Amino acid sequence: MSARFSRLCLIGLGLIGSSIARAVREKDLAGTIVAVDASEFVRARVRELGLADEITDSPQAGVSGADGVILCVPVGANAAVGAAIGPCLKPGAIVSDVGSVKAAVVRDVAPHLPANVHLVPAHPVAGTEFSGPDAGFASLFTNRWCILTPPEGQDEVAVAKIRAFWEAIGSNVEVMTPQHHDLVLAITSHVPHLIAYNIVRTADDLETVTEGEVIKFSAGGFRDFTRIAASDPTMWRDVFLHNREAVLEMVARFSEDLAQLARMVRWGDGDGLHALFTRTRAIRKSIIASGQETAAPDFGRSGPPKS
Amino acid sequence: MSARFSRLCLIGLGLIGSSIARAVREKDLAGTIVAVDASEFVRARVRELGLADEITDSPQAGVSGADGVILCVPVGANAAVGAAIGPCLKPGAIVSDVGSVKAAVVRDVAPHLPANVHLVPAHPVAGTEFSGPDAGFASLFTNRWCILTPPEGQDEVAVAKIRAFWEAIGSNVEVMTPQHHDLVLAITSHVPHLIAYNIVRTADDLETVTEGEVIKFSAGGFRDFTRIAASDPTMWRDVFLHNREAVLEMVARFSEDLAQLARMVRWGDGDGLHALFTRTRAIRKSIIASGQETAAPDFGRSGPPKS
């Protein structure tokens, strides 16, 4: 199965879209790269950075003749983009995306696509807290997971092509249902972001502790949360609104657990706390062993360890 | 003010104690380094690593003749160590510590010290998720903050010496009351750790999502929490039990805020979410500007950015 498209249209050239463009160039995964973006500023940067062969503000023009189309817009924009491009898609084209929620993508985009077009939603589980075409880099997806959630009965050749595409980019590919994806990501990504946003806000609201102190002493742990609390506001607003049920369910579980933990602190249950903290430490080791993290102390921020 | 001690006794040679030993050697901040540790394994490693000039399991013997003593044990052990060393301290000696809570240290240690000994509690705000003498490194404290919380009216020369000591090690020094320290650290360090421990546990408890999936897809955000949820269980049990009031107050604020955020998700308040996420992003920028963090995307885990 060739991973290469003749004409690949990327809609939205932010962190993810521009990283794909760079990776596609580097690995020669498209004959022609077409970049579509509504922002004049983004189009100008894409031109200056040389990320695409053709650049347009029109999704309809962009997808014309394309055998591959990847939506890289905030998930709240998918329905409108789907409606715009539906009538202009080439028969046999494959439409994919990069959204962090998947059931909503299928719900919002599928109805707009002609029967002879194949929808293969995808979610590359990678990112940074930066946004825009300048923030992207070709190795963003290297050794990261990309989850495909093809609708039941989807054309197997189309699914195999999107798999080959992401593997060529350097990702490991996994297939699951949109519903299971949204549950897994609610706990591994969405709720962690919500909690990070929340604690940064709680800290910022404190009148007895100054913002200067919060920033100064952030190396005590708070710092780790601020990175993901700096992620793109539009993208994340849309994620929460489009994975509402799973997010609320996970927040409820988290809150119950936190209440129990606070109770252990209040009543001085040292043994209970110690047992819990020992258990969580083991999970960290598994993540490092799986290659999804570095074991360097302090992420190497303090320089290389010396003895 | 000389930063140097003639005979410096470090009690507890874990991550922090062994990092101090390494920094003291590197900067020549003591004539003799005495290491005290209750663990035979730790004493053997300290000997093999050459971290101290004298090594003993006896706090009483260790502090004899020392003009500087630094307690580097979990804060729950401070009272017992204070009681043990009190009668053996040299007149004029300075006793300090590295605990993450400060009011409890003053409460637990001060009563055991003779009137002619100076207590200058300190908290270097630095660390990694690793423990033990092998995990330490001399640059751990470089460009990090060290907070001193001397009791009111404490000998100014003793305070100045501990300040000079930490500055020589490479830290920036700040002075505040123990009560204010405990409030600031509750929000910048203690509650972030509690929340990180909690979400790792919540994720691990999910039966519909496998542990394998939690680990695989941790790059979506969860990963950032697991680092601090891998911190030393004994140290953190003691921190929570010794800063109970401030921790519970901050957890209550956090929980109220999270409930409001969940409500915004439930009722689809996209504008409210966007405004909040924009505000938290600005705080991250301040932390990077203050030099307490690197701006490298993904902490540089994905390799250097390329365009």
Image (cartoon, coloured by chain):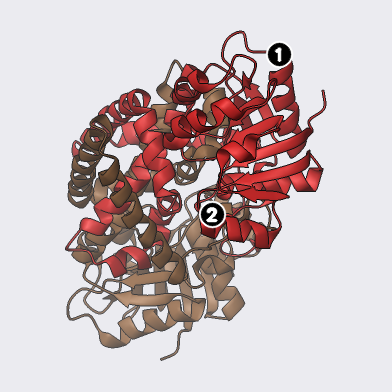
Chain colours: A red, B brown
The quarter of the rendered structure image containing the C terminus of chain A is: bottom right
Which image quadrant for residue B52?
Answer: bottom right
Q: Which residue appears at 59% of the width and 74% of the height? A: B25
Classify residue B306 as left or right of residue A250. Answer: right
**Residue A189 seen in the current view:** no
Front-lying residue, A204 or B273: B273
Chain for disc number 2: A
Residue with the most extreme top position: A153
Front-lying residue, B243 or B88: B243
Mark 2 or mark 1: name the one nearer the start of the chain: 2
Residue B40 location in percent, x, y? 55, 48
Residue type for callout 1:
Glu
Which image quadrant for residue B181?
Answer: bottom left
Residue B38 location in percent, x, y? 47, 51
Classify residue B241 as left or right of residue A124. Answer: left
Which image quadrant for residue A146?
Answer: top right
Q: Residue A132 has which mark?
A: 2
Q: Is residue B284 above or below residue B263?
A: below
The quarter of the rendered structure image containing the N terminus of chain A is: top right
Q: CA distance from mark 2 to mark 1?
A: 33 Å
Q: Is residue B265 above or below residue B186?
A: above
Q: Which residue appears at 62% of the width and 52% of the height? A: A136
Dot 1 falls on a residue whose secondary structure is: helix
Chain for disc number 1: A
Q: Which residue appears at 61% of the width and 8% of the height? A: A153
Q: Residue A156 has which mark?
A: 1
Residue type for callout 2:
Gly
Q: Which residue appears at 48% of the width and 42% of the height? A: B230
Residue A194 location in percent, x, y? 35, 40
Q: Residues within 10 Å of mark 2 (few under 14, many from 20)?
A: some
Q: Residue A187 has which mark?
A: none
